[in-house]
Image (cartoon, rainbow, N blue to C red):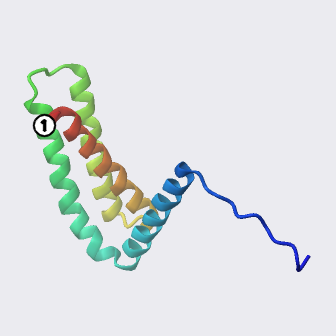
């Protein structure tokens, strides 16, 4: 068995992208855990500003139909959920994941309504 060699495995582009995203996520999570108090404080400010911008964009649209109000409800729930997670001192990974979900949802609302 000492003389046997394994064949090099070439990853597809999708697998390489997913490993890069996983590495970035784990690096950000470990940094967030290391300095959770400071990052939580800064993230509350940033996430609240982006969430309020998403709410403003939704309310500025001319159509005030039920779907826009449901999106506004979800923006509010996600923003308040992260703030509650920080105040309740939930686990770092849970808090970080809630931050990411809130930011991604708010940013997607902003981008879809502006373009």
Q: How many marks?
A: 1
- Residue at 31% over, 55% down: 82
The residue wearing badge 1 is 57
Q: Give the quadrant of residue 49.
A: bottom left
Is 111 displayed left or right of 60 in the figure?
Answer: right
Q: Callout 1: few (<14), some (14-19), or many (20+) C-alpha neighbours within 10 Å?
A: some
**Residue 26 horizontal/vertical position (percent):** 47, 67
- Residue at 48% over, 66% down: 23
Q: Is residue 8 above or below residue 30?
A: above
**Residue 101 horizontal/vertical position (percent):** 36, 50
**Residue 76 horizontal/vertical position (percent):** 24, 43
Q: Give the quadrant of residue 11.
A: bottom right
Circle 1: element type: helix
Q: Is residue 4 above or below residue 107?
A: below
**Residue 6 horizontal/vertical position (percent):** 79, 67
Quarter holding the C terminus is top left
- Residue at 88% over, 80% down: 2
- Residue at 27% over, 41% down: 108
Quarter holding the N terminus is bottom right
Is 75 displayed left or right of 58 in the figure?
Answer: right
Of residues 19 and 2, the one nearer the viewer is 2
């Amino acid at each position: 068995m000492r003389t046997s060699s394994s064949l090099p495995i070439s990853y597809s582009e999708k697998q390489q992208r997913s490993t890069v995203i996983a590495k970035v996520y784990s690096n950000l999570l470990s940094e967030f855990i290391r300095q959770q108090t400071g990052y939580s404080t800064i993230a509350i400010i940033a996430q609240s500003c982006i969430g309020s911008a998403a709410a403003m964009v939704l309310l500025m649209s001319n159509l005030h139909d039920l779907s826009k109000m449901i999106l506004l409800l979800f923006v509010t729930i996600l923003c308040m959920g992260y703030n509650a997670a920080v105040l309740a001192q939930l686990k770092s990974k849970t808090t970080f994941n809630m931050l990411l979900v809130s930011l991604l949802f708010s940013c997607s609302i902003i981008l879809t309504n502006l373009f």
